[in-house]
Image (cartoon, helix red, strand yellow):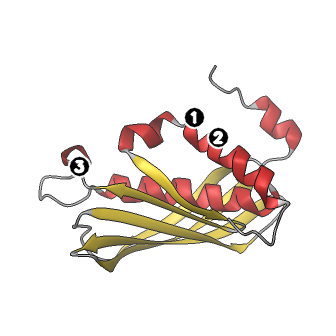
Amino acid sequence: MNETDPDFAPIAARIRDNVGRQGFMGHVGAELAELSRGACTLAVDRRPELLQQHGLFHGGVTAFLVDNATTIAAATSRGQPALTAEYKLNLLSPASGDRLICRARVVKPGRQVAVVAADVFCVIDGKEKHTATALASIAMLDDAAAARIQSPA
């Protein structure tokens, strides 16, 4: 966390709490590795359930990491709730190795829509290999819109 930005501490705590309540994060086994204003890193270790028939990470795992990391990164900008509106994902090379890491960064924060870029790397023998890149449009919710979304109890 950025210690020169004391206003970020409550935003980071709220985001970490919200991410901790995401069942799919736990299901996939992903972790929130880094969080700062305008950036988020998610990572997941290799497990048989996350692989496709050739022993590579399934593209859906990459897509999930991009979806979640870009939304989380957008939420860090102003502390607003956020939802993915769309993303374009380019798979650059097979995602093998022991771990996938997705680093997302806000390109353009906005009150209604944020633009966020993400890059995904697989870790092979301790070295990172670039496997995917994405650009996302994230809908930033105001308090009224966020209140209309029902949260599971």
Disc 3 from disc 1: Cα separation: 22 Å
| Quadrant assignment, res 59 | bottom left
Frontmost of labels 3 and 2 is: 2
Query: SS class of the residue under badge 1?
Result: loop
Q: Which residue is mark 2?
A: 17
Q: Which mark is residue 47?
A: 3
**Please, which residue is most extreme toward the left here?**
54
State the quadrant of the N terminus: bottom right
Q: Mark 3 or mark 1: which comes first in sequence? A: 1
- The residue shown at (72%, 59%) is 76
Disc 3 from disc 2: Cα separation: 25 Å
Query: SS class of the residue under badge 2?
Result: helix
x, y (%) of residue 99?
30, 62
Q: Amino acid at mark 2?
A: Asp
Density class for disc 3 (Cα within 10 Å; few <14, some 14-19, many ≥20) is few
Q: Which mark is residue 21?
A: 1
Disc 2 from disc 1: Cα separation: 7 Å
Foreground of the two, 90 or 21:
21
